[in-house]
Image: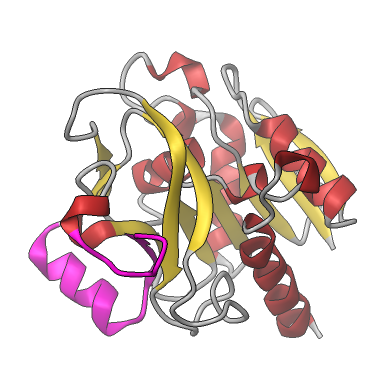
Amino acid sequence: MKFGVLIFPGSNCDHDMVYTLKNILKQEVIELWHKDSDLQNVDAIAIPGGFSFGDYLRSGAIARYSPIMESVIEFANNGGFVFGICNGFQILCETGLLPGALLHNDNQKFICKNVFLKADNNTTSFTKYIEPNKALKIPIAHGEGKYFADEETISELKNNNQILFRYCDENANVSNEVNPNGSVDNIAGICNKNKNVYGMMPHPERAADKTTGNIDGLQILESMIKSIEKQNK
């Protein structure tokens, strides 16, 4: 498949994403600069983490208005597959492609550490091929990672199986004690109703190379690729 990886001023996880998709997962990758509008006939779009435009206003708020995002929104609205990691998740919420918002962590500090996630269901591309009730160790690195939405939206997410992952402990138990940022219902990632737009705060691309001592992130990315390939057949 052909992946387009968006790059904004301040992006700092773009090369992580390119490396993982290209070198580890053996996919074709095109780098897409934020001022461009041509998506170059990609099959899927990745919006990486980092600090687009320095996060000086609000994480993802300025990037949402970059020229490339108009093309991404059109691509997504036509059924194209889009996924955002960390700042990419924030950008997708700013565009309205995903519901809710990412707020400052409860402790008002930047958090960089490994956490555990569990798939909430197996009806999405990111979770379809992940073993149920399995805790995955995935790193986080964010200051605004607290997922928030009103009660009606949270209810819709649950009813439509739009919750991808929840923060848990190493035994896959979900509790407030292991919630790193205060996200509602321990939510670590969601998708849209049509299940073609995905966002998550943790970084699976940083847990995909054996040299890091952790490849749990591969289960997430491989599930995504396998699902898209089957859908495109």
Residue 187 falls left or right of residue 73 = left
Q: Quadrant of the C terminus?
A: bottom right
- Along the line of sight, which residue is nearer the eye, 194 or 11? 11
User: Which residue shows up at 79% across the image and 41% down it?
Assistant: 211
Residue 157 at x, y percent in the picture? 28, 72
Residue 154 lies in the magenta stretch: yes
Q: Answer left or right for 121 relative to 105.
A: right
For image coordinates 71% across by 35% down, the residue present is 16
For the point 78% across and 48% down, which residue is it? 210
Q: Is residue 14 above or below residue 211?
A: above
Q: Position of residue 77 (x, y in %)?
A: 52, 63
Q: Which residues are magenta?
A: 150-175
- Tell me where residue 137 appears, x and y as whole percent: 52, 54
Q: Is 162 on the left-hand or right-hand side of 31?
A: left
In the picture as drawn, the residue positioned furthest to the left comes out as 151
Indicate yes or no whether the magenta region holds residue 169: yes
Q: Quadrant of residue 153?
A: bottom left
User: Residue 179: where, in percent of width, then height?
Assistant: 25, 50
Q: Determine the residue positioned at 54% across, 43% down.
A: 70
Against 81, residue 207 (above or below) is above
| Residue 37 shows in this picture | no
What number of labels is visible? Answer: 0
Is 92 situated above or below 99? above
Residue 196 falls in which quadrant of the image?
bottom right
Relative depth, front residue between 26 and 52: 26
Residue 125 seen from this side: yes
Q: Is residue 68 left or right of residue 172?
A: right
| Viewport quadrant of the N terminus | bottom right
